[in-house]
Amino acid sequence: LFGACRVPALTDKDTVAVNPDSTHVVVLENNQMYFFQALWPDGTVAVNEDDIVDIIIAIKADASKVKPEVSSRNSLGVLTTLPRGEWAVARDIIVSHSDSNATALDIVDCALFVLVIDDVAPKDIHEAAANMLHGTYNLRSKDNLIDYQAGSCCNRWYDKLQIIVCLDGRAGINFEHSAIDGHTALRFVSDIFADTVVSFAQSITKTIYSDRAFFPSLIQAEVRRASASNPAMVAPKKISFDLPQSVLDKIYYAESALSDQIVASDTFVLEFTGFGKTFIVRNRMSPDSFVQLSMQLAYYRLYGKIVSQYEPVLTKAFYHGRTEAMRTATETAAKFCKIWLDPKATSSMKLEAMRVATQQHSAGIKLAASGKGLERHLFALSKIAEKNDIPIPDFFSSKAYKKLNNTILSSSNCGNPSLRLFGFGPVVQDGFGIGYIIRDSGLQYSISSKHRQTERYAHTLKQTLIDMEKLLQPLSSVTVACDPVVTKTNTPPKEEECLEGYDDAYGETSSATEITANISHTIPVPSSFGVMRRKSSVTATLLRKFGQSITPANSELASRDNGDGTGS
């Protein structure tokens, strides 16, 4: 997660390089790159909130000196959106061009993460979701009609974990999925959000109960401000690159290709407030299975087809476990969709079909979470055969297998109260990418597609949820009579009466048994996973010497700088 980077390779597959000794953060502002040291070499925090404010103000002031049309032409981060082979070639040219370039890329690769500062304020939740996914598209032209990209889409570095903050304070995370799963990033987001809430509570209670701490800090981290003894150590510096014309041309072409992708993409957010997890559980169904069926039914109502639908299931109970695939388009799910559109079908027939379909889905979730899935196993067998020049069986090229893996509805359940939205793009050209969050009293969907009617599908999904609700029992009903008000409440089901699969704690769908597994111990990462411990040339001395200092003279960080890298 931290200090990690996906590195493209010229002749082999990408690797995920991790620098466990990383101490600095890279900042992207106006397509330009900066860095500052956030930790002491021993891991102690070197900056507090006031220091970070000074650092960001200094970076924004320096970045504003470069006009957008100039920074756009030099936006190196856009190269990370290229096909990996093309990015590997461009990166090799950059590194070979100068030793300074190689050092600069090493500093970026080894950073704890990338803080992205976007000078855009999304006008609504749909734009906010799209900005976190791929940035904004804003093509401008100068007087001589030479166009340039002024959107935030170039202000990214997709090979690393990115914290994106918009002009209005909205924030999001964009992460490299090959190395981690959604629940890992969710843990990071949850800690940030919860620590902010706790800090706010502390700021209130300390004015009343000065001698008592009612809210202990969520994150126990020692802060030893470098600005008090060695301000030059944490002063922000600009990362500059000497780019040949061939790379500058490649940046322009990469931006054009990325802009095509953005123009072809559509993101729409559905925030459904009619009911949520509590209502579904009261009706003795798995919330996740219910939501999965609603997406398949919405598609069937719109197009009259049952399509391949994918959902990842966590297998974290196992050593090095990640996910298994769950396919929602089961025989019972297809039967449910067909009964729903049958004008002769009664409400009881629809409800029974819904219960049977959700039960089969829940049973499949439980099997997948317990290591009894089949798709990851088959995929591994095909890759082993490929690596060892073993003939791959015809099964893997069969029509059925290809249709299964043409995932029209790619979905994932990841979220908790710290997140408003979670989403991703479609995995096939004619598909939908659907990230959803199941709340106690609502359902959040972030839906993306290319050249499809995303908003229309979302509206059909909303109507489908409303219609499904009509078949179920309300949470409670209140009647007014001469006697005191009597509340009739449905008896909640016993825990064993509901199939597992709805009590999601983190990330992609997980079963209740998996959540209780002991996975807190440290697990070494073997080389067979394509993850390597990075032997970096980035040292504390190099961080002090490299880069152009941009700290303003009136900054507290510079007030005690002797000019030779030491503080007084």
Image: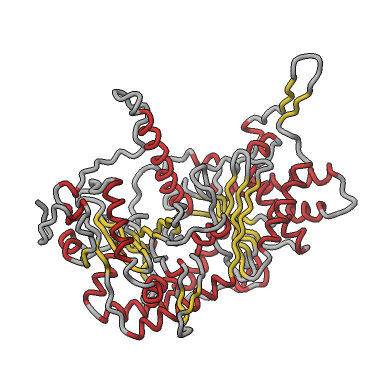
Q: Relative to residue 117, is residue 302 drawn left or right?
A: right
Measured as percent of width and height from the top left, residue 503 is found at 57, 40
**Drawn side of residue 466 relative to residue 310, left or right:** right
User: Position of 186 compared to 47: left or right?
Assistant: right
Quadrant position of the N terminus in the picture: bottom left
Give the residue at x 42% y 38%: 197
Which residue lies at the image location 24% right of the left edge and 42% below the top edge?
Answer: 223
Q: How is the image coloured?
A: secondary structure
Q: Position of residue 265 (x, y in %)?
A: 58, 68
Closer to the camera in the image, 196 or 563: 563
- Total labels: the figure holds 0
Q: Quadrant of residue 240?
A: bottom left
| Vertical arrangement, residue 112 with respect to residue 397, above or below | above
Q: As drawn, which residue projects farthest toward the right? A: 344
Left or right of 121 in this view: 275: right
Relative depth, front residue between 4 and 314: 4
Point out the residue furthest to the top here: 483
Decide which of 568, 311 is in the foreground and name it: 568
Residue 27 locus on image (x, y percent)? 33, 61
Residue 541, image x, y percentages: 15, 61
Residue 414 visible, this orientation: yes
Give the vertical position of 167 relative to 481 (above or below).
Answer: below
Q: Give the quarter of the image for residue 152.
A: bottom left
Question: Residue 83: in sight, yes or no?
Answer: no
Where 493 sits versus 255, above or below?
A: above
Q: Nearer the viewer, residue 508 or 145?
A: 145
